[in-house]
Image: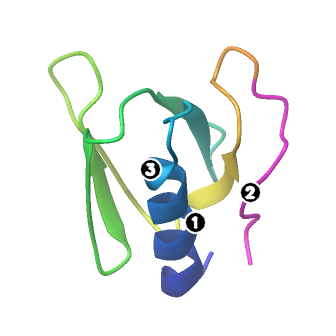
């Protein structure tokens, strides 16, 4: 995924009103659910997600396979921004 498309899609998903949870799937198959719009910091194609638990999730535009418009528990692969 390019830096521009990564930031554009992620910002759009985080700014939706009302906010709706969504899932990011990484190239290695790991998925995590974004459940709050203010739990993410992003700059120049790199993002940090502060999920519940002690360890933040670091990822970048190259590690994202897809952004799925549904929570992790129901994410079947409906993509908002497939790997470019």
Q: Is residue 62 left or right of residue 1?
A: left
Identify the element where label 3 is drawn: helix
Q: Quadrant of the C terminus?
A: bottom right
In the picture, measured across the screen, residue 12 lies left or right of residue 68, that is left
Res 80 label: 2
Give the residue at mark 1: 9
Say whether disc 2 or disc 3 marks the residue closer to the N-terminus.
3
Q: Are marks 2 and 1 in contact (CB under 8 Å)?
A: yes
Q: On the picture, is 67 further left or further right than 76?
A: left
User: Is residue 6 placed above or below 48 in the rendered structure?
Assistant: below
Q: Is residue 67 above or below residue 10?
A: above
* Numbered circle sitting on residue 14: 3
> Would you place residue 38 above or below residue 27 in this image?
above
The residue located at (63%, 24%) in the rendering is: 71
Callout 1: SS: helix
Q: Is residue 19 above or below residue 53?
A: below
Q: CA distance from mark 2 to mark 1?
A: 7 Å
Question: Per the image, is 65 magenta?
Answer: no
Mark 2–mark 3 contact, CB under 8 Å? Answer: no
Q: Which residues are magenta?
A: 75-84
Disc 1 + disc 3, Cβ < 8 Å: no
Tell me the SS state at disc 2: loop
Residue depicted at x 52% and y 48% = 16
Would you call the spot at circle 2 few (<14 residues within 10 Å), some (14-19), or many (20 or more)? some
Rendered location of residue 26, percent (x, y): 59, 48
Q: Position of residue 55 (x, y in %)?
A: 19, 28
Residue farthest left in this picture: 54
Provide residue 46's location: percent of width, then percent of height. 32, 68
Q: Residue at x 52, y 74 (%)?
A: 8
The image shows residue 2 at horizontal and vertical percentages of: 58, 83
The tag earlier along the polypeptide, 1 or 3, is: 1
- What residue do we see at 51% from left, 31% from top? 32
């Amino acid at each position: 995924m390019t830096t521009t498309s990564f930031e554009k899609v992620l910002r759009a998903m985080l700014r939706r009103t009302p906010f709706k949870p969504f899932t990011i799937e990484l190239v290695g198959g790991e998925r995590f659910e974004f459940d709050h719009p203010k739990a993410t910091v992003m700059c120049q194609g790199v993002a940090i997600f502060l999920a519940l638990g002690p360890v933040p999730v670091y990822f970048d535009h190259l590690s994202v396979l897809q952004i799925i418009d549904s929570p992790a528990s129901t994410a079947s692969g409906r993509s908002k921004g497939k790997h470019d």
